[in-house]
Image (cartoon, grey):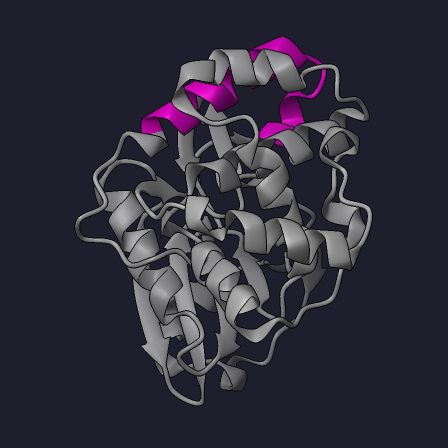
Amino acid sequence: MEKTKIQVNMDNFPKELHSYLEGTQIYDSSCRSTAKVYYISTGYYLKVDAKRKLEREVFMADWFYKKGLGAKMIQYITTDQDYMLTKAAEGEDCLSDLNHPEKLCELLAETMRTLHSMPIFDVPKSVAFENFLAALENGKGDYCESVLMPRFMVSSKEEAWEIMQANKHRLKCDTLIHGDFCLPNVIHKNNKFSCFIDLGMAGAGDKHSDLYWALWSLQYNLKTEKYTDYFLDLYGRENFDYSMLKVIAAFEAFG
């Protein structure tokens, strides 16, 4: 995760956070979302977003931590904005292991199987799954080819819509998913899984969503689809429906 050293005005943050910020080096570690993410040199991450925007992520981050799957939640403050403070995860993200693709696939597949075996009785629907339902209901969305893999190619927004309509009954909300199962969001330490980060999309959903994004992330970062089948074999072909991966591709491209 990239970090750019910055200066901050302490008055822009709630007083409850000042003791964590004072006398530290602070770095901007924001990425694609609208949220601002700050790394604090004493080993914390502070995420700032619109009021109530982080409420569900806070719940899921705390849930994952208590299950031994996430970094420790420290504080959640909601005023004019939301502020979520967590301990920094121990280890490195999976982008650090691109030179060992087989071992990377083994780590990811084992980690995903563990995640997908967790109970879901006390978690909400994932934002990822809710987005699928919203796309079906509203019939709106910008078609985005960049999320498609060559082997699961969908040729147009119209084809994506047809695939979604024909297969909407096959979607299941029966598995704990990350919702954005990409290499930067899986942390490992000493070649073993450490924890997940960036849990804003997590919750109950369809396992094929995680499978698809893991494959997409492997292909995007390794610049090849060579390891797609290897990863799926490691996860276990008996544990998913291969044809659903194109269905998920259509949903993701449509939204």
Question: Which quadrant would residue 1 be assigned to in this image?
Answer: top right
Whether residue 54 is visible here, answered yes or no, is yes
Q: Position of residue 52 (x, y in %)?
A: 39, 79
- Left or right of 204: which side holds 11? right
- Left or right of 138: which side holds 78? left
Near-viewer residue (53 or 155): 155
Q: Position of residue 98 (x, y in %)?
A: 69, 21
**Residue at the far left in the pictured view:** 121
- Left or right of 49: which side holds 3? right
The answer to whether 36 is drawn above or below residue 155 in the figure is below
Whether residue 45 is visible here, answered yes or no, is no
Q: Main SS of the magenta segment? A: helix
Residue drawn at (63%, 37%), measured in percent from left and top?
Answer: 246
Residue range of the region highlighted in magenta in the rendering: 94-114
Work out which quarter of the rendered image holds the C terminus and state it. bottom right
Near-viewer residue (162 or 116): 162
Residue drawn at (63%, 30%), measured in percent from left and top?
Answer: 215
Q: Is residue 95 magenta?
A: yes
Residue drawn at (42%, 28%), measured in percent from left and top?
Answer: 112
The answer to whether 203 is drawn above or below residue 207 in the figure is below
**Residue at the far bottom in the pictured view:** 80
Q: Position of residue 243 (x, y in %)?
A: 57, 30
The answer to whether 230 is drawn above or below residue 219 in the figure is above
Q: Position of residue 94 (x, y in %)?
A: 59, 29
Q: Is residue 213 magenta?
A: no
Question: Which quadrant would residue 39 be assigned to in this image?
Answer: bottom right
Total marks in image = 0
The answer to whether 238 is drawn above or below residue 14 in the figure is above
Residue drawn at (38%, 24%), measured in percent from left and top?
Answer: 113
